[in-house]
Image (spheres, helix red, strand yellow):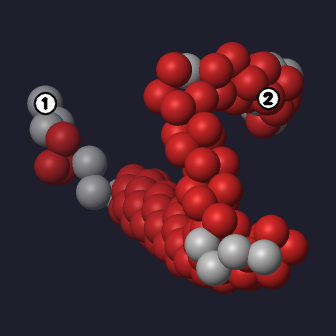
Amino acid sequence: MATLTDDKTPRNDSLIGNLTGYIDTRIDLVRLEAQEKAKTVFVSSVHGVALGVLGFLFVVFGSIYLGLLLNDVLDSPSAGFGLVAALYLLLAILFFVGIDKKIFQGVADKLLNNTIYKSDKRS
């Protein structure tokens, strides 16, 4: 009676070699895909942070400019900055109350509607 170790034929060695090579290739492919996804997340994160910083700087300098402009229009040394501060206070109250959630929910519904099924490549 022959055992499994006695069946060392060139065909079995070739089959085992091919299977081992296939498994190694699949492992390398998974590693490369993970590396690509990590790189994409990193680039997107850096891009988002850069846009956030630039947007923040725009709001800060735009607010200073608007305050100075309103000061000049109102002929007052501080009324313009008070109006800009009141605008930000009003926005903060609206966000705190939750009015923005309805707006963001509507936008999210339109943007993300059925994205799972659209991105699924299986038929």
- Image coordinates for residue 40, horizontal then vertical, percent: 59, 69
Q: Residue at x 70, y 75 (%)?
A: 76
Viewer-nearest residue: 103 or 20: 103
Viewer-nearest residue: 123 or 65: 65
Viewer-nearest residue: 55 or 33: 55
Left or right relative to 105: residue 36: left
Q: How far is disc 2 from disc 1 in space, using C-alphas? A: 72 Å
Q: Is residue 40 above or below residue 100?
A: below
Q: Is residue 109 above or below residue 42?
A: above
Residue at which label 1 appears: 1
Q: Residue at x 60, y 49 (%)?
A: 86
Residue at which label 2 appears: 107
Q: Can you tell which mark lies on residue 121?
A: none
Q: Secondary structure at mark 1?
A: loop
Residue 5 visible in this rendered orientation of the protein: yes
Q: Given contact means CB atoms under 8 Å apart, are the residues at marks 2 and 1 in contact? A: no
Q: Secondary structure at mark 2?
A: helix
In the rendered structure, which amino acid carries the disc numbered 1?
A: Met
Viewer-nearest residue: 1 or 60: 60
Q: Residues within 10 Å of mark 2 (few under 14, many from 20)?
A: few
Q: Residue at x 72, y 81 (%)?
A: 68
Q: Quadrant of residue 9?
A: bottom left
Q: How many marks?
A: 2
Of circles 2 and 1, which is in front?
2
Placement of the C terminus among the 4 image quadrants:
top right
In the rendered structure, which amino acid carries the disc numbered 2?
A: Val
Q: Is residue 122 above or below residue 34?
A: above
- Image coordinates for residue 117, horizontal then vertical, percent: 78, 23
Placement of the N terminus among the 4 image quadrants:
top left
Residue 54 visible in this rendered orientation of the protein: no
